[in-house]
Image: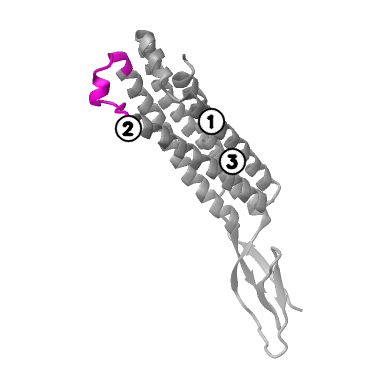
């Protein structure tokens, strides 16, 4: 009688540690932007009229549109995590792709907005801006610094989501060791997440040691899921930061 014993290759998994590590990293990001928000508050209290005027020159419609884009991207990110949790890789891939597209749209809009300001000579240390009041110079310096740093985080988030999209579409794989395969049997890859066996009458195999790589639904809700959740947390942080930046620079008028 043919027998096959599967011995999974052990891999250490500390998902709780991964979650805690991600929250600690997000805390450092909050400290970074928190310091910038504090700096903004100090200078705004010192130059209230100049900050009011600087905000009136920004494109409120573009800022509102970008806010809607990022809020919608948070929704699609949640839907991607929920789809993967239900082992629906197709929907997870679709929602991840939509999230990435929203992030790209945000960067394009921000590029258009920055280009318009730079075209009119409004950027840090420009000759035109040096003729304005010190408060306006501080306002635009903080504007470029804080929105630029946020844009860098958007780019990092897009790279991270792109990697996750690749892994979701590729499907996680796990190695197992098949031993003691008896006479007239040889292992082949199955198509529905399982290993199939094919008998060969013309050949006799007494003992075989096969190391196969096969796809496992267990990995979807385990290793890959925690990676996607952490990626989603990072993306939500980027959205939350913009929710604070938007009123500080666009709505103070």
- Viewer-closest of 29 and 124: 124
Q: Which residue is mark 1?
A: 65
Q: Is residue 15 above or below residue 252?
A: below
Q: Which residues are magenta?
A: 118-136
Q: Report the number of discs.
A: 3
Which circle, 1 or 2, is nearer the viewer?
2
- Viewer-closest of 22 and 17: 22
**Which element type, helix, strand or loop, lies under badge 3?**
helix
Q: How is the image coloured?
A: one colour
The reply to whether callout 2 and callout 3 are in contact (CB within 8 Å) is no
The part of the image, by quadrant, that contains residue 150 is: top left
Residue 152 in sight in this render:
yes
The disc at residue 245 is none
- Please indicate whether residue 118 sits to the left or right of residue 238 in the image: left
Q: Which residue is mark 3?
A: 229
Residue lying farthest to the right in this orientation: 1
Which circle, 2 or 3, is nearer the viewer?
2
The part of the image, by quadrant, that contains residue 148 is: top left
The disc at residue 119 is 2
| Label 2 or label 3, whichever comes before in sequence order | 2
Which circle, 1 or 3, is nearer the viewer?
1
Residue lying farthest to the bottom in this orientation: 202
Whole-angstrom CA distance, mark 2 to mark 3, is: 40 Å
Judge the density around disc 1: few (<14), some (14-19), many (≥20) Cα neighbours within 10 Å.
Answer: few
- Please indicate whether residue 164 sits to the left or right of residue 57 in the image: right
**Which element type, helix, strand or loop, lies under badge 1?**
helix
| Label 1 or label 2, whichever comes before in sequence order | 1
Seen at 59% across and 53% down, the residue is: 168
**Which element type, helix, strand or loop, lies under badge 2?**
helix
Residue 25 is situated, as x and y percent measured from the top left of the image, at 47, 34
Residue 2 is situated, as x and y percent measured from the top left of the image, at 74, 77
Residue 180 in sight in this render:
no
């Amino acid at each position: 009688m043919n027998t096959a014993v599967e011995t999974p290759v052990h891999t250490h998994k500390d998902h709780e540690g991964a979650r805690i590590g991600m929250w600690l990293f997000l805390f450092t990001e909050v400290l970074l932007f928190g310091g910038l928000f504090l700096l903004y508050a100090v200078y705004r209290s010192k130059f209230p009229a100049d900050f009011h005027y600087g905000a009136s020159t920004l494109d409120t419609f573009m800022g509102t549109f970008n806010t809607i884009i990022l809020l919608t991207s948070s929704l699609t990110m949640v839907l991607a995590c929920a789809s993967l949790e239900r082992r629906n890789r197709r929907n997870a891939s679709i929602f991840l792709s939509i999230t990435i597209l929203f992030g790209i749209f945000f960067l394009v809009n921000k590029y258009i907005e920055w280009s318009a300001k730079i075209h009119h000579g409004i950027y840090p240390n420009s000759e035109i801006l040096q003729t304005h009041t010190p408060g306006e110079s501080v306002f635009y310096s903080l504007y470029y610094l804080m929105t630029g740093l946020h844009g860098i985080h958007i780019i990092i988030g897009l790279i991270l989501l792109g990697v996750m999209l690749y892994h979701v579409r590729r499907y996680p794989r796990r190695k197992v060791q098949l031993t003691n395969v008896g006479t007239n049997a040889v292992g082949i890859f199955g198509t529905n997440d399982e290993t199939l066996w094919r008998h060969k009458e013309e050949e006799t195999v007494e003992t075989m040691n096969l190391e196969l790589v096969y796809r496992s639904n267990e990995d979807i809700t385990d290793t890959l899921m925690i990676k996607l959740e952490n990626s989603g947390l990072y993306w939500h942080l980027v959205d939350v930061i913009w929710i604070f930046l938007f009123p500080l620079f666009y709505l103070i008028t």
